[in-house]
Amino acid sequence: MLNREDWLPLARKLDWEFSYTTEQEVFPQVISGHPWLPHSSWQDWEEAFKTSYREYVQNQHEKDMAVYAVRDAVGRLENVQSLATPWINGLKIHAAALPLAEFTGTIGNLRGARFGRDSAWRAMACFGALDEFRHTQIPLLLMHELVRWNPQFDWAHKFYHTNNWFAIAARHFFDELTLGQNAIEFHIATNVILETGFTNLQFVGLASLAHEAGDYLFEKMVTSIQTDEARHAQIGHPVLALVMKHDPEYAQYLVDKWFWRNWHLFSILTGVSMDYLTAADQRSGSFKEFMEEWIVDQFFRTLDEFGLKKPWYWDIFLDELEIYHHMIYASAYTYRSTLWFDFVMPSPNDRKWLRQKYPKYWDDIDAVWERIGERWKAVGPGADEESSVLGTALPTFCDLCQLPLSAGTPRNNTANVLALEGKDYIFCSQPCRWIFLREPERYANHKDLVKRVLTGEAPADFTALLTDYFRLTPDTWGKDVYAGDYDWL
Amino acid sequence: MPLPLYGFMEGDTIGLLIVADEQESVRSLADKLRDAASLRVDGSGSMEVVYRGIVIDPDSTLAQAEFKPLQRFDLRGNHGLSESRYSR
């Protein structure tokens, strides 16, 4: 019987020359990606893990058993019910955003498993697809138990099947990142930017907060997922290295584009959970501090490793780091009935903490919370008064990221209009406009929520929009956790 | 003809869709945005409407001021720089 080191290199590096077709036909550029290079250019593609299928299955089995053990020990309904209510609502955000997004990662990896340009890449992408399927199944399994208790957890599976405004934005992101993407762009965008960078926010930063919050099941789930991510994320680095060698301008574009797109989505997903839905005494750091430690430093290492430049919008990004998710949360609080989880107002202590962590623009955000608090005081607390503390005009959305026009600051919103080929588009920021203009054929036909309403595709009546289009119900649409009944009000 | 517009109130955290008739006054448009943003922003005091970088006379109609659909307008606190301010 052959030793592992005798058969594995041969099994991983099993490429051949085609005799009855061409390499271009087997790996068309449209789906394998740009730049198209002959296999001789890719044949040195390598990654460090060099896992065999047997080892993969054994490792994954052990990891699954560890997750189940934690579930059996501390994952019962009463364990979840004992967590702080705001944290549980942060859990609902991730329960919805994570599983089916991971499933799109299965499809993206399968594209790499077929159209990746070297056999070792394809083998690793096959494991990546299995990983992502696991990351779909685990949260669906764990959250399923909670649906009977709280129907908002049903959004773990339902979210991406709705036309909820945040689902439209998340689909727009993942459709491009994973479902409709060629192998090269998929692996650079997903492995190098998303998984080496931004998912650290979820799987390391948020996991540590989950520990502090006593949510050991969430902590175990995401750290287990992270071990898979750390392995299959290695696919992207050698891909980026070769693209950088042959078309450095394109490599820079992909990195710049996907850093920005990830930033907007994750600042909402994670920033809101960290700074608003985690109790102040359980926060080990602010979202901005996590970003600086886990994303910015890591991103700079990536740039250095590949000889890339800082994105042109870096100063805009640093400014948004101070305020973007605060703009979003204050806005979303006043439109909470459009979402599937409940909200909490930041208390005076929270606001003091946020002022310390985000001194640059906090005064402007604080004025908004002061105003919302005045409304609650005027109408009094109680579920019957919720509607008096909700916005009524339709919010507006960016034609690129599909997220609310909440970029810039309260004094200077950076939304900007573009006229292109007889149509008007609006963008929340200059980087979103720049991405759109680089590939207008990719983005121009997608309608944001406002245009769907204006063309009759979505209901203009607000309640009908919530129920018929967003698929919310009075039981599931978002509310204030305390119905405005705060001691400090 | 109804005009859907993107309205941005100074001090607010989000842009809002404001639908107005082109024969409506700029003052009326401003009032709609002020009401829509009032949950988050105190809109009392002198304000001015800015469209395509120009402060607009509040008594003109949207048609006269050449408002077009799906364009941005702003409602800003008047800082004493313009004659076209108004208070509600």
Image (cartoon, coloured by chain):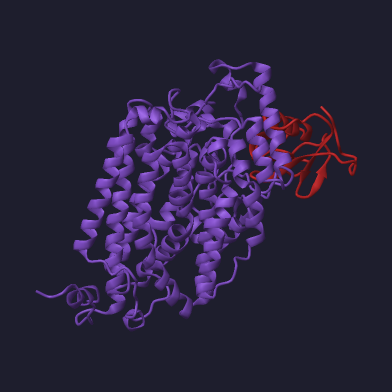
Residue closer to the observer: A52 or A412? A52
Above or below A349: residue A383? above
Counting the numbered discs, the total is 0
Residue closer to the observer: B34 or A413? A413
Judge from the rendering whether residue A488 lies leftward or rightward of residue A448; answer left or right. right
Quadrant in which the N terminus of chain B appears: top right
Single out the residue that lies furthest toward the left.
Answer: A1
Counting from the top left corner in percent of width and height, residue A288 is at: 59, 50
Counting from the top left corner in percent of width and height, residue A135 is at: 33, 49
Quadrant in which the C terminus of chain B appears: top right
Judge from the rendering whether residue B72 lies leftward or rightward of residue B81; answer left or right. left
Above or below A59: residue A306? below
**Quarter residue A317 falls in:** bottom right
Q: Evaluate whether residue B5 shows in this view.
A: no
Q: Evaluate whether residue A46 shows in this view.
A: yes
Q: Which chain is purple?
A: A
Residue closer to the observer: A35 or A299? A299
Residue closer to the observer: A272 or A438? A272
Above or below A57: residue B59? above
Q: The red chain is which one?
A: B
Counting from the top left corner in percent of width and height, residue B27 is at: 78, 32
